Image (cartoon, grey):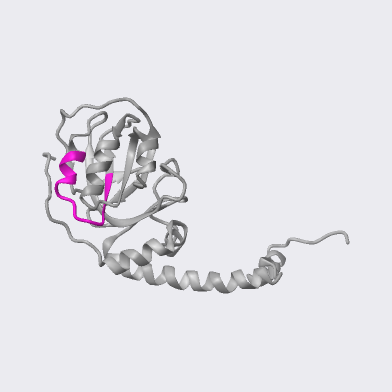
Amino acid sequence: MNPVIVRKIARADTQVIAKLGEAGVATIHEAMNRSGLMRPYMRPLYPGAKVAGSAVTILSHPGDNLMIHAAIDVCQPGDVLVVALASDSTDGMFGELLAVSCQARGITGLVIDAGVRDSEVIAQMNFPVWSKAISAQGTVKATPGSVNIPVVCAGALVRPGDIIVGDGDGVVVVPREEAEAVASRAEQRMQREDAVRERLRKGELGMDIYGFRQKLEQMGVRYVGE
């Protein structure tokens, strides 16, 4: 495929994106039948980092951040940069100056299957980042790539405009066409968990709430002793 920069993409409704952000990664993952997660090595740069926004996807070459600069040019406020690599890399492809540029353009976060540098400064800026590594290894700007094409980032398929949700549990991808339905299922799940949480606080056991005693009996598990 020849390098390409797609300027315009479809995005989900902002209210739906906000609802997904409130639900969080673990709940969304369950609401999507335990799918959509990026690999667990993708960790937030600082505790408490959260993001929910539309994906602007980038396919870059290892050690080359030229296409990150190109992607910022076509972003809208609320977008999340998602950087996939043509092959494995931990080079520090994103640093403080790019973070400053992102914040100035209203970009709400970065997910990169490579390394970042200037990590402490970026954390102080409260710019949410999920990455494979932290590395001071510098990069060049010499190799063409693509912006806003389907990519695989940390094992997850991400298409332009899909919703990216990140928190302390990692990163999950919600297909744009499914966003409203997933948000609804996530909200229902949170309501059920609220009810269970209250019962647990009162001393009930998950064994009884979920009917696990009967399940164990059906499996042939026996209690022995007093």
- Residue name at image x 69 percent, y 67 percent: 205
**Residue 164 lies in magenta, yes or no?**
no
Residue found at x 28% / y 46%: 82
Residue 150, can we see it?
no
Q: Is residue 121 visible?
A: yes
Horizontal and vertical percent for residue 149?
19, 48
Q: Position of residue 162 (x, y in %)?
A: 27, 57
Q: Tell me what residue is drawn at x 18 percent, y 45 percent.
A: 72
Q: Is residue 81 above or below residue 222?
A: above
Q: Quadrant of the N terminus?
A: top left
Q: In this orientation, which residue lies closer to the viewer: 46 or 225?
A: 46
Rendered-image quadrant of the C terminus: bottom right
Residue 20: x and y, percent? Answer: 37, 64
Work out whether residue 121 or residue 79 is closer to the camera in this orientation and state it. Answer: 121
**Camera-side residue of 159 and 65:** 65
Determine whether, in the image, residue 181 is placed left or right of residue 64: right
User: What are the residue bounds of the magenta stretch?
Assistant: 68-82
